Image (tube, coloured by chain):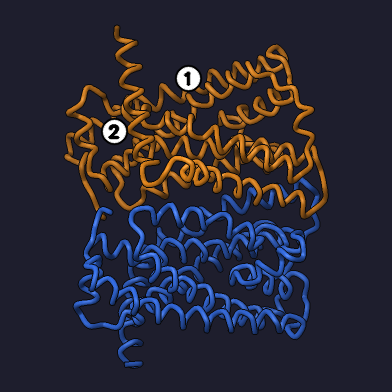
Chain colours: A blue, B orange
């Protein structure tokens, strides 16, 4: 079963990676577009004569935005779109484990977005002459990987549960977009929130990941001081992944009974 | 007779846009939905000021800029995305030619709804934002006439931008959202929205001068502070001229692109859904 899951994941990830990267225009667009928005934020900080650290804070947060949108639009609503285009019944009929399909979507999406996020980060660091602690790159990378694990596991939970939505799915995604970015403090440090809010937002993988990377890359703090972030992200990832595997089975079984797996134009 | 007929058709198109946008839920929930996103986008920007240091003057700059920028984004989307959505998603674009509307009229009518709908989130976001940065909003004595005039001028150039994008969307398949996002994001960077465009390095600052949004944002800020018509007359004239110029260019461009697309049979091409 494990082998089948990984074979399916590889197949699904291959389509996603190949599909998005076969045309280099996609990459250029995906780096250039966020760069416009992030540049505006960095200019706003410059207008306020903010210290260089704020530019680094916004650059790291800005580069991570792509992952959240990817989770929402290419994970959460993906199975809904697969159902609309008629692929979902084919997945199920093929006998490929749906956990593998979800995992493949996650791995492919994470890979694609990582290339783009790095592009955005390097571009902003270079264009705005932002200083970061490069000697902390390795522990920051570990935080980054754990963030993706937790974030895309959450995306897998969304993908399974969002199957029951109709066309209002896009509205749900839109509602989850900016509020989560705000509470994750993508453009500003989350310490501006009251302490209780800071505690609450720590269940958002994006908020934790961004904060961890900032502590390392912007403030140069040693990894041990943010051990709790590593552990929290790991626990969140495991919990979300477990929920996702249970949820997708449940939704598949329920869909077969109620006959909603082929339902379109709700 | 022609005017009354046009108003009737506009009313029908605005109603259609409302139904497409809002009939997935109950009206109060829809209002909440339309307000949440702009409010949080505004908060995202305002917390830049909160994070650095309290600065009411710059806070007001961002508050007005971002609140009105939401209208820019949704207004452009309202026109441009309609073409893409009707063709790709609903596959209904070809049926426009079976109605008494021409394409430009149809897109403008559909897009107008966004300017009505957008007023609610604009107001809510503005009040919430002012509360966050402790801006004494009730001390403002806005020049309402100037504000309304500027809003109407804004509708003209925003619709023009929407039509320009729609002209290109007629030919594109996968890059629909890219065209919309590129223009909307560029306006955030060049448009005097969350920082003064004068901060942009040369030659980027020159781009800002030829964009109506730069002047539109300034006049919005002046109008809210109660500045008189005569004090901003120069900028108002420039904005008026730019808005009309962009509108004329957009209508010509759409006409040309539409004609080519119909000849090549591209009006109802679809790639997904």
**Residue plotted at (52% across, 79% down):** A149
Q: Residue furthest top?
A: B1
Q: Pick whichever of labels 1 and 2 is earlier in the sequence.
A: 1
Expressed as whole percent of the image width and height from the top left, the position of residue A173 reads: 46, 57
Residue B257 is tagged as 2
Q: How many marks?
A: 2
User: Can residue B230 be spotted in the picture?
Assistant: yes
Looking at the image, residue A108 lies above or below residue B9: below
Q: Quadrant of the N terminus of chain A?
A: bottom left
Q: Is A173 on the left-hand or right-hand side of A92?
A: right
| Figure quadrant of residue A94 | bottom left
Same chain for mark 1 and mark 2? The answer is yes
Look at the image and tell me whether residue B195 can be seen.
no
State the separation of the CA atoms marked 1 and 2: 20 Å
Residue drawn at (43%, 71%) of the image: A109
Name the chain letter of the residue that bears numbered label 1: B
């Amino acid at each position: 079963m494990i082998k089948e899951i990984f074979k399916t994941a590889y197949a699904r990830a291959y389509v996603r990676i190949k599909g998005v990267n076969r045309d280099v225009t996609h990459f250029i667009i995906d780096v250039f577009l966020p760069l416009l928005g992030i540049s505006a934020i960095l200019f706003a900080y410059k207008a306020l004569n903010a210290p260089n650290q704020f530019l680094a804070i916004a650059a790291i947060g800005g580069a991570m935005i792509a992952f959240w949108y990817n989770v929402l639009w290419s994970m959460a609503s993906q199975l809904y779109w697969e159902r609309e285009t008629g692929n979902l019944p084919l997945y199920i009929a093929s006998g490929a484990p749906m956990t593998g399909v979800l995992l493949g979507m996650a791995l492919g999406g994470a890979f694609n977005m990582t290339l783009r996020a790095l592009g955005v980060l390097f571009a902003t660091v270079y264009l705005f002459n932002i200083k970061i602690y490069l000697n902390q790159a390795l522990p920051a990378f570990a935080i980054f990987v754990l963030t993706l694990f937790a974030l895309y596991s959450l995306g897998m939970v969304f993908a399974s549960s969002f199957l029951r939505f109709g066309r209002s799915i896009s509205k749900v995604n839109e509602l989850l977009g900016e509020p989560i970015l705000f509470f994750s403090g993508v453009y500003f440090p989350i310490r501006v929130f009251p302490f209780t809010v800071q505690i609450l937002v720590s269940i958002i993988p994006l908020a934790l990941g961004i904060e961890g990377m900032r502590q390392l890359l912007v403030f140069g703090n040693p990894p041990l001081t943010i051990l709790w972030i590593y552990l929290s992200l790991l626990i969140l990832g495991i919990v979300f992944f477990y929920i996702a595997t249970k949820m997708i089975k449940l939704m598949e079984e329920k869909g077969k009974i109620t006959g909603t797996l082929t339902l379109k134009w709700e | 007779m022609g005017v009354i007929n046009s108003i009737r058709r506009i009313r029908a198109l605005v109603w259609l846009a409302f139904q497409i946008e809002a009939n997935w839920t109950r009206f109060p929930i829809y209002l909440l939905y339309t307000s949440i996103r702009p409010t949080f986008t505004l908060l995202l920007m305002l917390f830049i000021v909160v994070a650095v240091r309290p600065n009411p003057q710059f806070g007001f700059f961002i508050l007005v800029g971002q609140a009105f920028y939401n209208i820019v984004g949704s207004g452009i989307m309202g026109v441009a995305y309609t073409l893409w959505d009707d063709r790709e998603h609903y596959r209904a674009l070809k049926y426009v030619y079976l109605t008494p509307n021409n394409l430009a009229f149809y897109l403008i009518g559909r897009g107008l709804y966004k300017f009505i709908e957008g007023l609610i989130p604009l107001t809510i976001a503005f009040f919430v934002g002012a509360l966050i940065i402790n801006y004494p909003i009730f001390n403002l004595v806005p020049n309402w006439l100037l504000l309304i005039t500027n809003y109407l001028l804004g509708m003209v150039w925003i619709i023009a931008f929407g039509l320009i994008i729609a002209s290109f969307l007629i030919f594109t398949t996968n890059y629909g959202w890219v065209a919309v996002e590129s223009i909307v994001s560029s306006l955030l960077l060049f448009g005097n929205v969350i920082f003064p465009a004068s901060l942009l390095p040369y030659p980027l600052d020159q781009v800002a001068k030829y964009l109506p949004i730069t002047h539109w944002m300034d006049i919005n800020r002046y109008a809210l502070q109660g500045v008189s018509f005569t004090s901003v007359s120069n900028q108002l004239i420039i904005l008026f001229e730019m808005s009309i110029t962009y509108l004329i260019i957009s209508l010509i461009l759409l006409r040309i692109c539409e004609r080519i697309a119909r000849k090549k049979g591209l009006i109802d091409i679809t790639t997904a859904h």
